[in-house]
Image: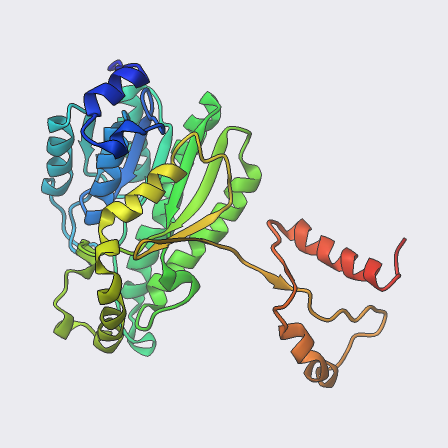
């Protein structure tokens, strides 16, 4: 097992002192081990660079396939590792697929064999098979679910077990605005990315103290998933509309803007869990699932559909809302509605 050098924070800061940003660098990953899947893309490589720059040993995983997830190459992961080595960082390449249980286990085993622990997982590997909802094939659906949903399970389960044993860990699940707000011609991709929210919610409730899991919603340019020429894509009208907007904040679409948030979420400084954060064009926001205060109809007789129609305005009213973090939390909103009506003491 290789030993991870752990230079003091002061020494690392001095070595990296090239400007005011580095001079105030406080978040530190020295002695920690990070696994980044999909590390060869624009976002993945940016994650690796920022983690390594702040002292992490990095496992750069990339199957090296095309945007649909087909094929493979060692070149993507190797290029990242070569870059990190040039920075003086400790890093190894891994080419296993996240789409199988064996592949996910092999990635984490590689980290444990090389560095002895796993502190951070950024589940970033992805593929796309965009198409009209009515035209998506079974393979189009299965392939995307295998990488994004099963892939998150396959990489996070063995990592979670290692984190539980050591009493510390940070898991960052990379989702997409397609999963919460929706974008056309991405039914398979949007469904897969939404699934990561449910996965986060459950892990966060089960995880022991010291382990945090959060979900990242990134937007950036330059990745492999956007590599298909625009005139060959079914969503050309959407892409043109998006381009008309992003040209106003194009500088904020660099992968480094996302890497800043991802590395915060992967750090000790991020004490929150079960949070969702978005970055788009330099704008950082928290996402959440809200529940309107709604209309309460206590039993014993159930309302009929005419009653629902009569109260739909109140049901839809977003003026007041709750943000449940579990099924029990939602049950508590019903108890609160009963107390408001004086039904319970």
Residue at image position (30%, 48%) is 258
Residue 106 on image: x %, y %: 28, 33
Q: Is residue 62 left or right of residue 203?
A: left
Residue at image position (31%, 31%) is 34
Residue 238 is drawn in which quadrant?
A: bottom left
Residue at image position (57%, 41%) is 205
Residue 187 on image: x %, y %: 36, 68
Q: Quadrant of the N terminus?
A: top left
Q: Is residue 106 left or right of residue 307?
A: left
What kind of colouring is applied to the model shown?
A: rainbow
Residue 340 in the image: above or below residue 7: below
Residue 275 on image: x %, y %: 49, 47
Q: Nearer the viewer, residue 195 or 179?
A: 179
Residue 61 in the image: above or below residue 150: above
Residue at image position (43%, 62%) is 180
- Outermost front residue: 20
């Amino acid at each position: 097992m290789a030993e991870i050098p752990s230079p003091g924070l002061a020494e690392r800061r001095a070595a990296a002192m090239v400007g005011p940003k580095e001079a105030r660098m406080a978040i530190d990953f020295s002695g920690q081990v990070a696994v980044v899947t999909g590390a060869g893309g624009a976002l993945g490589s940016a994650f690796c660079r920022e983690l390594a720059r702040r002292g992490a040993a990095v496992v750069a995983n990339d199957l090296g396939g095309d945007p649909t997830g087909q094929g493979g190459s060692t070149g993507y992961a190797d290029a990242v590792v070569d870059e990190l080595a040039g920075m003086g960082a400790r890093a190894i390449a891994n080419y296993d697929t996240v789409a199988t249980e064996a592949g996910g286990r092999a990635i984490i085993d590689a980290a444990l064999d090389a560095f002895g622990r796993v502190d951070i997982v950024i589940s970033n590997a992805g593929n796309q098979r965009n198409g009209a909802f009515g035209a998506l094939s079974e393979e189009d659906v299965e392939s995307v679910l295998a990488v994004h949903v099963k892939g998150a399970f396959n990489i996070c389960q063995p990592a979670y077990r290692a984190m539980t044993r050591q009493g510390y860990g940070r898991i960052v699940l990379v989702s997409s605005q397609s999963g919460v707000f929706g974008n056309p011609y991405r039914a398979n991709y949007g469904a897969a990315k939404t699934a990561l929210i449910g996965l986060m919610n459950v892990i966060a409730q089960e995880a022991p103290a010291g382990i945090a899991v959060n979900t990242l919603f990134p937007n950036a340019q330059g990745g492999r998933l956007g590599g298909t020429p625009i005139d060959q894509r079914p969503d050309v009208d959407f892409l043109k509309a998006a381009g008309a907007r992003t040209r106003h904040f194009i500088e904020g679409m660099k992968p480094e803007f996302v890497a800043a948030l991802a590395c915060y979420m992967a750090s000790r400084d991020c004490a929150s869990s079960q949070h969702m954060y978005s970055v788009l064009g330099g704008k950082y926001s928290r996402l959440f699932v809200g529940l309107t205060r709604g209309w309460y109809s206590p039993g014993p007789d159930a309302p009929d559909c005419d009653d629902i129609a009569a109260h739909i305005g109140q049901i839809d009213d977003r003026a007041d809302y709750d943000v449940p973090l579990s099924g029990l939390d939602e049950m508590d909103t019903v108890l609160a509605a009963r107390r408001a009506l004086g039904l319970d003491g």
